[in-house]
Amino acid sequence: MHEAKQNGAVGIFFSGIIGALTLNHPHLFPIYAQAEKLDLPICVHTGQSCRHLLDFFDLELNGTFATSHLPPLIGFRDLVAGEIPERFPNLKFGFLEASASWVPFLYHHLKRSARPRPSFPNARWKHASCKDLFRDYRIYVACEADEDIPYLAEFIGPDHLMIGSDYGHNDPAEEKALVQTIRTREDLSPDLADKILSDNPKRFYAL
């Protein structure tokens, strides 16, 4: 990680599940601690990194949703539910190439799961809104150019939305006309477009 930082790295690639480890596993804490010291955010990306999922799902029958796109959502749930960002108060977390429309669902699930009940009498939910959660836990998420960005910006907060073009990567996530698409959307103000395309990524990657 030190060598990568010296050679220009601006983030640490992570999957939502790493082998048999979820992102709230203590085995990963030394990596988080070092990333925090180096000001390198944790970049949770789609990808097939869990053999158990690969063995269970059939690519021809099920596609790559469960093996590639679902792990970042599980990682988000585990990081937030485990309050991992509180252990590393200067570490940033980003969720990339998995879109952003899942955030309202998972926020509702996490908030509902944290209600006190007989089996978990000490459960608590300290975040007044999703905006507070993303701000307090330094979470960023990359949306896609054709999502309901005004709604997501209102729900998540305009300062924590980014966008990724997957430039140079020949797969369905690539968006060659990314900037033009964002700039020409009539429902996005120039200020919000600037935040998504430039201001927020610069803050996230400490550029």
Image (tube, helix red, strand yellow):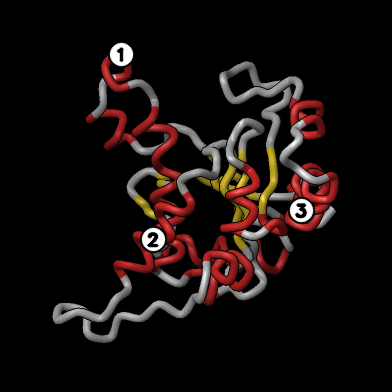
Read off the residue under disc 2. 108
Viewer-side residue, 36 vs 163: 163
Residue at 80% over, 46% down: 189
- The dot on residue 200 is 3
Residue 95 shown left or right of residue 191 in the figure: left
- The dot on residue 60 is 1
Q: Nearer the viewer, mark 3 or mark 1?
A: 3
Q: Amino acid at mark 3?
A: Asn
Residue 108 lies, in percent from the top left, at 39, 60
Q: Is residue 157 above or below residue 192?
A: below
Q: Amino acid at mark 1?
A: Glu
- The dot on residue 203 is none
Residue at 68% over, 53% down: 1
Q: Nearer the viewer, mark 2 or mark 1?
A: 2
Which is more N-terminal, label 1 or label 3?
1
Provide the secondary structure element on which disc 3 rests: helix
Q: Are marks 3 and 2 in contact (CB under 8 Å)?
A: no
Dot 3, crowdedness within 10 Å: few (<14), some or many (≥20)? many
Dot 2, crowdedness within 10 Å: few (<14), some or many (≥20)? few
Q: Amino acid at mark 2?
A: His
| Inter-mark Cα distance, 2 to 1 | 32 Å
| Inter-mark Cα distance, 3 to 2 | 24 Å
Q: Nearer the viewer, mark 3 or mark 2?
A: 2
Q: Is residue 34 visible?
A: no
Which is more N-terminal, label 2 or label 3?
2
Q: Which of the 4 quarters of the picture holds residue 111?
A: bottom left
Q: Is residue 49 above or below residue 23?
A: above
Q: Are marks 3 and 1 in contact (CB under 8 Å)?
A: no
